[in-house]
Amino acid sequence: MATVTPTLTISSTDAFSDALSFSVTVASSTTTPSAGVTRMSSDEDPFGDGAGIIMTEAASTGTTFLYLKHLGVLASDGTTASHASTDFITIKNADGDFNIAKLQPNEFMWLPVAPFDGHDGGTEAGGIAIVKGGAAVMVEFAYFTRS
């Protein structure tokens, strides 16, 4: 059994009248399915279910923790900085029913994903997808299922 320990630290000396500083750490035992750190273009189709799907419905039958980072570079060459106002990514459920989050270049998220319910009877891919706002960009992601 593996353990994943994410730590979130938030601090600021000027966001509020008082200084802000806190850190939260939670260790979780994990099991399969999981995916190690992977980099891909927002236009890629790694599972054959559609461009940008990074986690399929079948992959998440328990609570799954998703790490996702917008790497801030264009997919065309992997080095040119992406444009902050147009080259964002939107994180959606893969069926396209609703938006979950929006990441600008160099932003990241840690999301506990509820188990998928398969309510559509398998007619749609399901899962989590990223949708580019402008040009295709590079992202990094990994996911871990709590045991």
Image: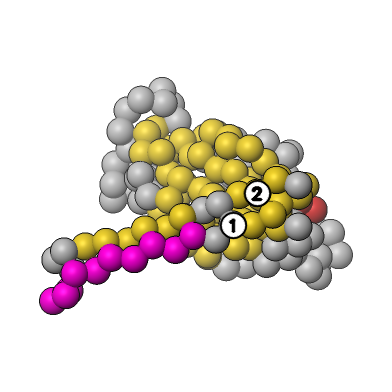
Q: Amino acid at mark 1?
A: Ala
Q: Most prominent secondary structure in the magenta stretch?
A: strand
Q: Residue furthest bottom?
A: 17
- Secondary structure beneath label 1: loop
Horizontally, residue 140 falls left or right of residue 119, namely left
Q: Quadrant of residue 72?
A: top left
- Nearest to the observer: residue 96 or residue 3: 3
- Nearest to the observer: residue 12 or residue 121: 12
Looking at the rendering, the stretch of residues picked out in magenta corresponds to 16-25
According to the picture, the residue beneath numbered tag 2 turns out to be 3
Q: Position of residue 95 (x, y in %)?
A: 67, 60
**Mark 2 touches mark 1? (CB < 8 Å):** yes
**Residue 11 seen:** yes
Horizontally, residue 49 falls left or right of residue 138, namely right
According to the picture, the residue beneath numbered tag 1 turns out to be 27
Q: Amino acid at mark 2?
A: Thr
In the image, residue 26 lies in the stretch drawn in magenta: no
Q: Give the Cα separation between the discs numbered 2 and 1.
A: 7 Å
User: Where residue 9 is drawn, which disc sits there?
Assistant: none
Task: Look at the picture and state if 23 lies above or below 4.
Answer: below
In the image, residue 18 lies in the stretch drawn in magenta: yes
Q: Position of residue 140 (x, y in %)?
A: 51, 39
Image quarter where the C terminus lies is: bottom right
- Secondary structure beneath label 2: strand
Q: Quadrant of residue 22?
A: bottom left
Horizontally, residue 145 falls left or right of residue 75, namely right
Q: Residue at x 32, y 61 (%)?
A: 10
Q: Residue at x 35, y 45 (%)?
A: 105
Q: Position of residue 65 (x, y in %)?
A: 61, 56
